[in-house]
Amino acid sequence: MPELHRARSRASIARAAILLPILGLPLLLAACRAEPPPAERPPEPQAQAQAQQAHTQLRDAIKEPLDKARAVEQTLQQAADQQQKQADAAEGE
């Protein structure tokens, strides 16, 4: 009887040695993905357009007060030039 038990044990080990790689192969193949995960995909063009629009809005928000300041500076310089001309004309009389 012990010999029969040993023979069954050896047969079970042989079957396990064959079945384990066969059953493990689909698990290994399932782990391989052809498509990258969503985090690794490049951004969508729409997202890039929104980012570009945000940069444009930010640039405009910074540029607008600077343009107004330049316009006020030009107006003040013209007023100062005109006042200087009037002062020069008054001294010449």
Image: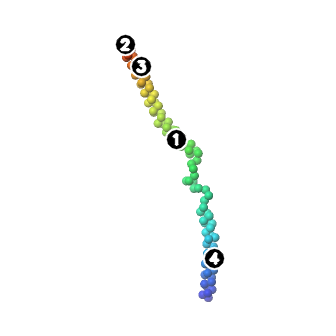
Q: Given this view, does label 4 or label 2 mark the residue nearer the observer?
A: 2
Q: CA distance from mark 3 to mark 4?
A: 106 Å
The kind of residue on which mark 4 rests is: Arg
Q: How would you rate the neighbour count of disc 4 (Cα within 10 Å): few for under 14, some for 14-19, many for 20 or more?
A: few
Residue that mark 1 sits on: 54
Q: Up-down: is 53 above or below 29?
A: above
Q: CA distance from mark 1 to mark 2?
A: 57 Å
The kind of residue on which mark 2 rests is: Gly
Per the image, label 4 sits on a secondary structure element best described as helix
- Identify the residue at image location x=56%, y=45%: 47
Residue that mark 4 sits on: 15
Task: Please report contact status of discs 1 and 2: CB closer than 8 Å, yes or no.
Answer: no
Task: Please report contact status of discs 4 and 2: CB closer than 8 Å, yes or no.
Answer: no
Residue 46 pos. (x, y %): 58, 44
Q: CA distance from mark 4 to mark 2?
A: 120 Å
Q: Is residue 72 left or right of residue 31?
A: left
Task: Please report contact status of discs 1 and 4: CB closer than 8 Å, yes or no.
Answer: no
